[in-house]
Image (cartoon, rainbow, N blue to C red):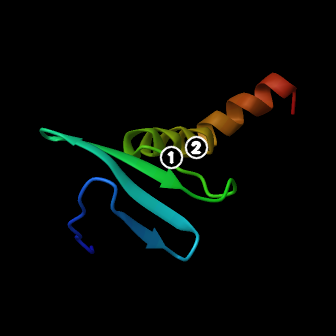
């Protein structure tokens, strides 16, 4: 992991097309702005992990068997 220090209104650039800017710092909270192409998905980590968990659950064999029952297959 790369750890960088940035002040308000300073930014970092990732892969020439993603810019992360520090918008505000108040106590232990930091407001971050992200400029990226529309095709780059950006999620808060807790949301990303929930999506991954739901996708994993949707591909379980038992879920597939129940779906086949509903479809009469």
Between residue 65 and residue 57, name the one nearer to us: 57
In the displayed structure image, the side of residue 2 where residue 27 appears, left or right: left
Label 2 crowding class (10 Å Cα cut-off): few <14, some 14-19, many 20+?
A: few
Percent position of residue 8, x then y: 27, 53
Q: Residue at x 78, y 27 (%)?
A: 69
In the image as oriented, which residue stretches furthest toward the front? 9
Quadrant position of the N terminus in the picture: bottom left
x and y percentages locating residue 25 in the rendered image: 22, 44
**From the viewer's perspective, is 12 left or right of 71?**
left
The part of the image, by quadrant, that contains residue 65 is top right
Residue at 58%, 70% in the rendered image: 17
Callout 2–callout 1 Cβ contact below 8 Å: yes
Q: Residue at x 12, y 38 (%)?
A: 27
What is the C-alpha distance between the residues marked 2 and 1? 5 Å
The one of 71 and 26 positioned closer to us in this rendering: 26
Q: Using the image, determine if residue 6 lies above or below residue 73.
A: below
Depicted 4 relative to depicted 22: above or below: below
Q: Which residue is mark 2?
A: 55
Q: Which residue is mark 1?
A: 52
The quarter holding residue 7 reads: bottom left
């Amino acid at each position: 992991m790369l750890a960088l220090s940035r002040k308000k209104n300073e930014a970092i650039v990732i892969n020439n097309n993603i810019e992360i800017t520090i918008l505000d710092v108040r106590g232990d909270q930091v407001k971050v702005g992200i400029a990226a192409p529309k095709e780059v998905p950006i999620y808060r980590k807790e949301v990303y992990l929930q999506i991954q968990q739901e996708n994993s659950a949707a591909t379980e064999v038992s879920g597939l068997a129940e779906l086949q029952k509903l479809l009469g297959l």
